[in-house]
Amino acid sequence: MKLNLFRKNKVDFNLPSTYRTKVIEGVSIPGIIRNGTHFFVDLEVYEDGRVECWNFEDFEHFKKDVKRGWVAVNIPNGEEISIHSLGSWTVSDGSWNYNKDSFIDYVWSIVKHLNPKLDNIYSYSEKKVNGVTIGESGKGKIYKEKKRTPNDPFPEKIKGTGINLFFKDEKGEYHLVRFDVYDQESIWVNRFEEPFEISLTQFEQMILEEKILTELPISTQVNIFGLGFFKIKEERYSAKISEKLLEVKDTIRVLNGEPSTIELCREIYQKYMGNPTVRLKEELKEAYENIPEHERMYVGDMDVKDTAVRMIIYGEQEIENWSHYQVAKEMGEELPSISIPKPKKE
């Protein structure tokens, strides 16, 4: 702190800025968010009593979210479960572990397990800047510990990425599990009473053996450890297992510090827009088709998505598949356009 020596007892607050971060430990549990449809999610429960449920305030607010049905404790038969990047199914014959009160008690028991003395339980207060409420993300980091010695008091935290898939066990029963991907030799299979570790090679072999899947037969019972089970009445859509394997491999590349297939595609797209050549068009096509199908929409922004890239690769008629174009056409409004340069010969 710099003192103003010319004014006794006065402090100059024109000081250099600093900030600190604090690690708040937590765990992930399977849950359901009811926002139009039922979204299967990981709820993140933290030692300070906060729960990330697409809202992130304090435990009293979480209780209200459960009571009002934002955080759901079941999916009624005949309604849809949507699982990000995996698919969507209509459920039947569901059996769920909790009602609203028991689910709140269950989550609170996790908080007490993480923080037995209930020290520093968070109390939410609204934050506004220039009259605008400022929200806060509670999305945490998936990690595993790497100890340098058996009694290492400060083990290294190795970051990973979670991917939802179906798993068929030795009894022939199906489970919705989370594969936490770290590297080629470490993929943890979670949402079992005893999680276990496999390698990428084993992961690929399990796909060949149809133990790891994205598509299930109608009437299959799906177990979700810690939440309940349901049967599949109808499939709305599902990702291809081959595309999920590409996603896992891409995830490993990113965790190793390499650019993702999406980032590589964006880079070539920008090069093409600055210098549209036949060679760059072919490179763009290869890069785009290397991206898992269910992730290709993320190449562009939230409005255009991958439409511009597809127009370059496959032709200008691709604009007809753009949602903005379809809405304008249906409403009889002026059709939007996307300007794409033609490739020039080199």
Image (cartoon, grey):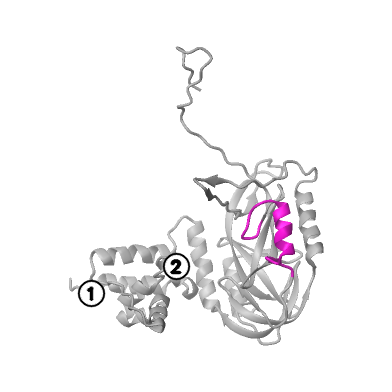
User: What is the span of residues highlighted in magenta in the rendered image?
Assistant: 52-73
Q: Is residue 64 magenta?
A: yes
Q: Is residue 206 magenta?
A: no
Residue kind at label 2, given as amino acid type: Tyr
Position of residue 242 in the picture relative to residue 29 (left or right): left
Dot label at residue 298: 2
- Which residue occupies the foreground of this view, 58 or 223? 58
Other residues around mark 1 within 10 Å, as few (<14) / some (14–19) / many (≥20): some
Residue 186, picture quadrant: bottom right
Position of residue 245 in the picture relative to residue 75 (left or right): left
Looking at the image, residue 257 lies above or below residue 318: above
Other residues around mark 2 within 10 Å, as few (<14) / some (14–19) / many (≥20): some
Position of residue 183 in the picture relative to residue 7 (left or right): right
Looking at the image, residue 115 lies above or below residue 299: above
Judged from the image, the secondary structure of the residue bearing numbered disc 1 is loop
- x 65%, y 50%: residue: 145
What residue did someone put label 1 on? 342
Position of residue 7 in the picture relative to residue 150 (left or right): left
- x 69%, y 45%: residue: 122
